[in-house]
Image (spheres, rainbow, N blue to C red):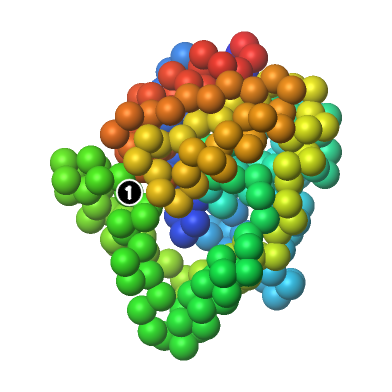
C-alpha cells in the first residue's frame, strides 16, 4: 500500500482530487487530500502570503513515514516546498500541470493585478476558464466547465489575493529537483497553455530520475479533466 498526499490547484479545494482519490483508494492505497491555507475548511489566518505557510500547514499531516507527494498547479509549488523543507518525507514527487521555475516580472505583476481586483470586489477571474481547461474539455464537458466557473465565482476573495501573492513570491525550485534522489513523475495535459511543455522539460531535465506523462485532450486541470489517466499515471510510476 502506498500513501499519497494530493495537493490541489488554485482556487480549488481538496475536492478537486475526489475522483482520483476514489480510484487510488479502490486499489487499497491511502490518500491524504487536505484543503490548503484559506481554501475549503482551512483557515487563512493573518500571516504574510507564502508557499512556506502552506507547506507548514501540510507537513503536520504526513507523520514520520515518507509519502508520495503530488501537487497540481499551486499544489505543485507546495509539493516542491515540502521537498525543499524535508525531502525525507517524500518517497516520490508527482508534479501535475505545474512548474518549478519562479515567476518572471510580468507574471508577478499579473498576480498582483488579480489580487487587487479580488480585494476590490471586481471580476478577478475574467477569461481564466480558457487557461484552466483544455479546448477539448471546454467543447465536450459542459458540466465540468460549469463547475469550474462556480469555483471561480465562489472563491473567497481574501484567499484569492493571499494565494496570488504567495505564488508570486515563491522561489525557483529547479535546484530542489536536482537534489532529490527519489522518482519524479511530471504529468501535463496536452492542451495545458498555463504550464506548457518547455516548463515540463525543465523539470524532467533537472531531476535525476524523472518520467514525463502527457495526457491527451486535457488542459491545466488534468485531475478533473482526466481522472482515470492521472490515477493510472500515479499508480504506474510511483512506489508500491
Q: Quadrant of the C terminus?
A: top right
The answer to which image quadrant residue 91 occupies is top right
The furthest residue to the bottom: 120
Category of crowding for the residue at label 1, using alpha-carbon neighbours closer than 10 angstroms: few (below 14), some (14–19), many (at least 20):
many
* Residue 72 sits above or below residue 211 on the image: below
Give the residue drawn at x 47%, y 71%.
156
Q: Position of residue 103 (x, y in %)?
A: 63, 60
Q: Nearer the viewer, residue 92 or 18?
A: 92
Give the residue drawn at x 35%, y 41%.
191
Residue linked to disc 1: 133
Q: Quadrant of the N terminus?
A: top right
The answer to which image quadrant residue 183 occupies is top right
The furthest residue to the front: 198
Q: Position of residue 7 (x, y in %)?
A: 57, 43
Q: Nearer the viewer, residue 145 or 131?
A: 131
Q: Is residue 33 visible?
A: no
Q: Position of residue 55 (x, y in %)?
A: 72, 50
Please give left or right for residue 152 compared with residue 69 in the image: left
Q: Position of residue 131 (x, y in %)?
A: 36, 55
Give the residue drawn at x 53%, y 25%.
212
Amino acid at each position: 500500500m502506498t500513501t499519497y498526499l494530493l495537493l490541489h490547484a488554485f482556487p480549488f479545494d481538496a475536492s478537486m482530487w475526489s475522483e482520483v482519490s476514489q480510484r487510488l483508494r479502490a486499489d487499497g492505497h491511502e490518500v491524504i487530500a487536505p484543503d490548503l491555507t484559506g481554501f475549503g475548511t482551512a483557515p487563512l489566518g493573518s500571516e504574510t502570503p507564502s508557499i512556506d505557510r502552506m507547506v507548514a500547514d501540510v507537513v503536520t499531516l504526513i507523520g514520520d513515514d515518507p509519502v508520495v507527494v503530488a501537487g497540481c498547479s499551486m499544489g505543485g509549488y507546495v509539493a516542491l516546498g515540502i521537498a525543499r523543507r524535508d525531502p525525507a518525507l517524500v518517497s516520490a514527487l508527482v508534479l501535475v500541470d505545474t512548474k518549478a521555475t519562479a515567476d518572471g516580472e510580468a507574471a508577478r505583476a499579473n498576480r498582483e493585478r488579480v489580487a487587487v481586483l479580488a480585494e476590490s470586489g471586481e471580476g478577478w477571474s475574467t477569461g481564466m476558464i480558457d487557461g484552466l481547461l483544455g479546448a477539448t474539455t471546454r467543447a465536450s464537458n459542459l458540466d465540468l466547465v460549469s463547475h469550474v466557473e462556480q469555483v471561480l465565482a465562489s472563491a473567497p476573495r481574501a484567499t484569492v489575493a493571499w494565494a496570488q501573492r504567495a505564488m508570486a513570491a515563491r522561489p525557483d525550485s529547479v535546484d530542489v529537483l536536482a537534489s532529490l534522489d527519489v522518482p519524479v513523475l511530471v504529468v501535463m495535459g496536452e492542451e495545458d497553455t498555463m504550464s506548457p511543455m518547455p516548463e515540463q522539460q525543465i523539470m524532467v531535465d533537472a531531476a535525476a530520475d524523472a518520467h514525463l506523462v502527457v495526457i491527451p485532450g486535457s488542459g491545466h486541470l488534468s485531475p478533473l479533466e482526466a481522472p482515470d489517466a492521472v490515477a493510472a499515471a500515479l499508480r504506474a510510476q510511483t512506489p508500491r
